[in-house]
Amino acid sequence: MAARFFAFLLYKLMDWGLVLKRRPREIQLYKKKHLFNSFVNNFAYWLMIYDQHRNQAFDKAFQEHIKSDTEALEIGTGHQAFLTRMAANHQPFSITSIEENKDAFLQSLKMICKNNYNNIRLLNEHSTQFKSNKKFNLLFHEIIGSIASSEGVVHSIRKIKQEYLAKDCVFIPQSVSTYFAPVSTLKLSGISKVLDYLISKNDLGIGYHRVYNFPSHLKMAKEQIFENLDFDKDIDDIQKDKLRFIIEKAGWWDGFIFFIDINFGNNNSVNSLNQHTNWSVPYIKLLDEPIYMEKDEILDIVIFKDLSSLNVYYDLQVNIEKVNKNIRFQWASTSRWAIDIE
């Protein structure tokens, strides 16, 4: 109940303008059954369940695409089988849902049995272990991270796409893009500063921070695409890109924000920067002492991504032309960061 209450409260606080941030936690910091881990896992699930933007987008897509002959496959039910039950309400022929986490699977199974659904089949396994004798004509999932690929979605759906989907299969969502942009220094004040300290107990030093309700006016240039995942197409495991930001709004630059835009088709989308969602806005702070960037000054970027496993790896290299400085920031989806400055 506490996790549910705090998830609800977080959305209310964001409506009031509160900004909260936290750093990622080491995976093995506590044992699996530790009370803190239990709270965090349940809190994450309730954040998704209370995310009205996410839920409305999925429901609209289900209404558009689910027919009486739809055989749907879901990856990742969560602990309430929330999207499974939402899809079932649109009366597909059948839904097969996969959940790797045993505790979440058992809770989902309890919810399905309690509500007497007769067209849902739940499996306790990872999607890479899945086998089936039939082809599915609809695939839905929400294994999308705050940086879209960070929950291993590319690896998780690869085998299923190759072997178990009909040629005309509908994907919900259809695609998701991660954008990033240079920003001026985030400084918390007032109640945001007090509550954030009580929750996080750390400062805004160099590193990777997950921020809720990031102030979009701190962007110093128009966002550009960090990655684009179109689920109906083949997605490369190894990706390398070069791009350039030209500063449009002068200010004290110290890093980048990342946000996602999830496309469900027909002008139905969710944006984690412009809407209050369960996805945080990652803020990668690269400098203790920010650099003042004038309008039209340049940041050259090299991006490397390895999406070939569940532990996704990222490498961001930044050349700051005005001070002849290079910064390299590396991180993985299940570990902390590493940074080099030349």
Image (cartoon, rainbow, N blue to C red):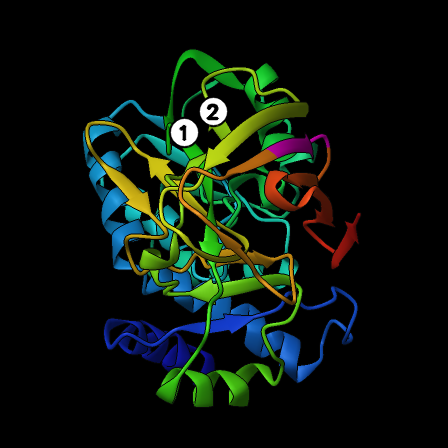
Q: Is residue 51 magenta?
A: no
> Which residue is rendered at x = 41% and y = 29% of the image?
175
Mark 1 → mark 2, Cα distance in angstroms = 6 Å
Q: Which residue is mark 2?
A: 231
Q: Nearer the viewer, residue 199 or 184?
A: 184
| Crowdedness near tag 2: few (<14), some (14–19) or many (≥20) residues, C-alpha within 10 Å | many
Q: Residue furthest top?
A: 167
Asked if 192 appears above or below 236 in the picture, the reply is below
Q: Is residue 60 above or below residue 332?
A: above
Q: Dot 2 lies on which element?
A: loop
- The residue depicted at 45 percent of the width and 13 percent of the height is 166
**Lateral position of residue 271 relative to residue 260, left or right:** left
Q: Quadrant of the N terminus?
A: bottom left
Q: Amino acid at mark 2?
A: Phe
User: Circle 1 — which element?
Assistant: strand
Quarter of the figure with residue 51: bottom left
Residue positioned 53% across, 87% down in the render = 197
Q: Position of residue 189 (x, y in %)?
A: 40, 83
Label 1 close to label 2 by CB (< 8 Å): yes
| Residue 175 tag number | 1
**Of pointers 1 and 2, the one earlier in the residue sequence:** 1
Image coordinates of residue 35 in percent, x first then y, are 65, 83
Residue 171 in view here? yes
**Span of residues in magenta:** 301-308
